[in-house]
C-alpha cells in the first residue's frame, strides 16, 4: 500500500498524510520533516539543506532520494507508506519508480491536491508549526487552544522560516516549474487522482479516504 500525496505547498498534504497515517496504520514519510529534523540536529546534511529550504528552493535530488531510500527499508514501512512531499521533480519520481521496482513494489495511487494560489498564500502565511511534533495550526481556520503552544504535544509553535511571505512566492514558482509536471507523469501511468483541496479538513479527508479504499 503505497500512496503519494502531491500538490503545492499549503495544499494540505501534511495534514491529510497525518490523518491517513492513523487511519491506514502506515507511516507518513515527509521529506520536509526529515530535513527539518536534520537541521535541528545540526548535522552536515541539515546545514546544507537549510540554505535551500529557507530560500524556498528544492534540496538537491541526490540528497532527498538518499533519505527516502534509507527510510523505506525500515521495518515500519514493510506494509506500505504514505509519501508527503516526495517526489518533487521528475528525476525523483523516476528514481522512486526504479527503487520500488527493485523491491517488487509499486505505487497504488498519487493523490493530487488542487488549491488556488490566493488560498495557498493565505494558508501558508497564517500557519504556525510545532517545533516538536510538526503539527500545524492556522491563526484563523485552526488556532491553537493556547497561544504559541501545540494542542497535541505542548511544544512551542513557530512560523516556519519558509512560510514568510517573500519565500512563499518562490516556493509556489518552484512548484509550478519543477513539481507540477509530475501530474502529467503520473497521469500517463494511470495513477493520478485529483482532489479539490477546498473545504474543511474533514470534508477533504472523506474524499481522500474514498480514493485509498
Ligand atoms: P515541505 O515541508 O514538504 O513543504 O518541504 C519544505 C522544504 O523542504 C521544501 O521547500 C524544500 O526546500 C525541501 N524539500 C522537501 N521535500 C523535498 C523534495 N522531495 N525535494 C527537494 N526538496 C525538498
Image (cartoon, helix red, strand yellow):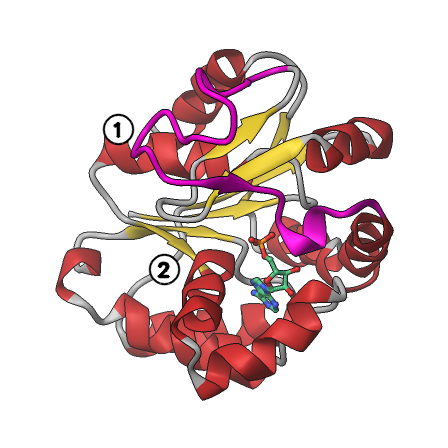
**Extreme-front residue of the structure:** 147
Q: Is residue 131 above or below residue 62?
A: above
Main secondary-structure element of the magenta-colored stretch: loop
Q: Earlier in the sequence, mark 2 or mark 1?
A: 1
Residue toward you, 114 or 71: 71
Q: Residue at x 76, y 66 (%)?
A: 55
**At which x and y percent is residue 209?**
39, 23
Q: Residue at x 61, y 73 (%)?
A: 50
**At which x and y percent is residue 90?**
66, 70
- Image quadrant assignment for residue 176: bottom right
Q: Secondary structure at mark 2?
A: loop
- Answer left or right for 54 relative to 106: right
Q: Is residue 176 visible?
A: yes
Q: Is residue 66 above or below residue 39?
A: below
Residue toward you, 160 or 149: 149
**At which x and y percent is residue 186?**
60, 54
Q: Is residue 85 above or below residue 136?
A: below
Q: Residue at x 55, y 18 (%)?
A: 142
- Image quadrant assignment for residue 127: top right
Ligand 1 closer than 8 Å to the CB at disc 1?
Answer: no
- Answer left or right for 80 relative to 92: left
- Answer left or right for 8 relative to 195: right
Q: Which residue is under mark 2?
A: 106
Viewer-nearest of discs 2 and 1:
1
Q: Is residue 156 magenta?
A: yes
- The residue stretch that appears in magenta: 141-165
Say which mark, if any, is on residue 23: 1
Residue toward you, 63 or 195: 63
Amino acid at each position: 500500500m503505497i500512496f503519494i500525496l502531491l500538490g503545492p505547498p499549503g495544499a494540505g498534504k501534511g495534514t491529510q498524510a497525518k490523518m491517513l497515517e492513523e487511519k491506514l496504520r502506515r507511516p507518513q514519510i515527509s521529506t520536509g520533516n526529515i530535513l527539518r529534523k536534520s537541521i535541528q540536529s545540526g548535522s552536515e546534511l541539515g546545514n546544507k539543506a537549510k540554505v535551500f529550504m529557507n530560500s524556498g528552493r528544492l534540496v538537491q535530488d541526490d540528497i532527498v532520494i538518499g533519505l527516502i531510500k534509507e527510510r523505506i527499508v525500515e521495518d515500519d514501512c514493510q506494509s506500505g507508506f504514505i509519501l508527503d512531499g516526495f517526489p518533487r521533480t521528475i528525476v525523483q519520481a523516476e528514481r522512486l519508480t526504479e527503487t520500488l521496482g527493485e523491491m517488487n513494489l509499486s505505487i497504488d495511487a498519487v493523490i493530487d491536491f488542487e488549491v488556488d494560489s490566493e488560498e495557498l498564500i493565505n494558508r501558508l502565511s497564517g500557519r504556525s508549526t510545532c517545533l516538536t511534533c510538526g503539527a500545524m495550526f492556522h491563526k484563523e481556520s485552526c488556532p491553537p487552544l493556547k497561544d504559541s503552544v501545540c494542542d497535541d504535544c505542548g511544544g512551542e509553535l513557530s512560523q516556519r522560516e519558509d512560510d514568510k511571505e517573500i519565500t512563499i512566492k518562490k516556493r509556489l514558482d518552484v512548484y509550478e516549474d519543477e513539481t507540477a509536471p509530475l501530474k502529467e507523469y503520473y497521469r500517463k501511468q494511470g495513477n493520478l487522482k485529483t482532489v479539490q483541496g477546498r473545504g474543511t479538513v474533514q470534508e477533504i479527508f472523506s474524499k481522500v479516504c474514498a480514493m485509498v479504499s
